[in-house]
Image (cartoon, rainbow, N blue to C red):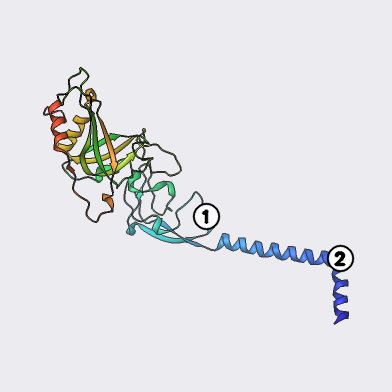
Amino acid sequence: MGNLSVGMKKFLSNKNTVTVIGVIAAVLVLYIGYNWRVRLATNPVTVPFAKVTISPGVQITEDMIGTMEVPPAMLKGNPLRSVAQVVDKYSAADSVIPEGSLFYSRSVVEKGQLPASIILDYPKGYELYNLPVTIASTYGNSIFPGNYIDIYLKASTKTADGADLLNDQSNRVMLGKLIENVRVLAVKDSSGQAVFGNQDENRQPAMIIFAVPQEYFVLLKKASFLRTYESELIPVPTANSLEDEPGDIKVSNDQMKDFINRVTVWTEGME
C-alpha cells in the first residue's frame, strides 16, 4: 500500500504527466461545453404564432393562435414564448401581425395601452371626463385604471369682488365630497400616453379619465369653471374596487350641487 502511494506521488509530480492531465481535462471541458451549447441552439422550443392575419387594435383570441417548434437560434427580436403571454391581449395600434408570424413584445399590448381603449369601457348615456392631476394629487402615482375614486370640491366662499356667499365677513373655504364611486378608466401623461403602459418609462400623470352620467358631467364642468371662487376638484382613492359589488356613482352632497348650480348657468346646446 505504501509503495502504491509513493508511486502515485511520483507519477503526479512528473511535469509531463500533469501537463497531459491538464490538456485532457481542458479538452473534456470544451467538448462538454460545446455539446451543451449545440443542444441549446438546436433543441427546438415551442412558441405561439398567428394562424390568421391580425389587424391593429384587435383582441387576440385563442382560435387565432397556433404553436410550432423552432430552433432557439431563430428567436430574434424578443418574441413571446408562451400562449399565456398572447391570449386575450391586443395587437398594437400601429402593428399588423401577419399570418404565420411569431408574436413579438412590441406588437402585443394590454387593452389599456390602446389609444382608443377607453371608448369601449363606459356605459351608454355616460360622458368621458378628463380631470387634470399631478403626481401629488394622485398620491405619488397610486391611482390606477380600474380603481374607484371620490371627487371632492374645494372652493372659496368669497368672490373676487368681495361678496361673501355665506353672508358673513369671513373668507372661508368649502370642502366636501361632491361625487362618489367613480371608476377610473385611464391615467395619461401630458402627451396622452398611458402612464402605466410602459414600466420602463417614468411617465408622470397629467390627467385621470373617467365616465359619469351626463348630468354629473355638466356638474363637474361647471365646478371646474368656478375660477372666481378658486375652485379645485380633488380625486380621493377609495377601497370600492375591492368590493364584490362596488356602489353606484352618485352625487353625495346636495348643498355643494346647489351652490354650483346657483353660481353658474348651463345653456342647452353647449355640450
Q: What element carries label 2?
A: helix
- The image's mark for residue 221 is none
Above or below 227: residue 119: below
Amino acid, disc 2: Asn
Q: Which residue is rendered at x = 22% and y = 41% of the image?
A: 211
Q: Which residue is rendered at x = 21% and y = 26% of the image?
A: 226
Amino acid, disc 1: Met
Which of 25 and 212 lies nearest the eye of the viewer?
A: 212
- The quadrant holding residue 209 is top left
* Mark 1 / mark 2, whichever is N-terminal: 2
- Residue that numbered label 2 is attached to: 16
How far across and how far down the image is residue 138, in percent? Answer: 34, 39
How far across and how far down the image is residue 102, in percent? Answer: 43, 53
- Residue that numbered label 1 is attached to: 74
| Residue found at the very far top of the displayed protein | 161
Can you see residue 244?
yes
Above or below 180: residue 206: above
Q: 10 Å neighbourhood of mark 1: few (<14), some, or many (≥20)?
A: few
- The quadrant holding residue 137 is top left
Above or below 71: residue 132: above
For the N terminus, the quadrant is: bottom right
- Count of numbered circles in the view: 2
How far across and how far down the image is residue 227, in percent? Answer: 24, 24
Can you see residue 265?
no
Q: Which residue is rendered at x = 51% and y = 62% of the image?
A: 44
Q: Left or right: where does residue 51 sit relative to residue 175?
A: right
Above or below 188: residue 13: below
Q: Is mark 1 on a helix, strand or loop?
A: helix
Between the residue at mark 1 and the residue at mark 2, the CA separation in whole angstroms equals 45 Å
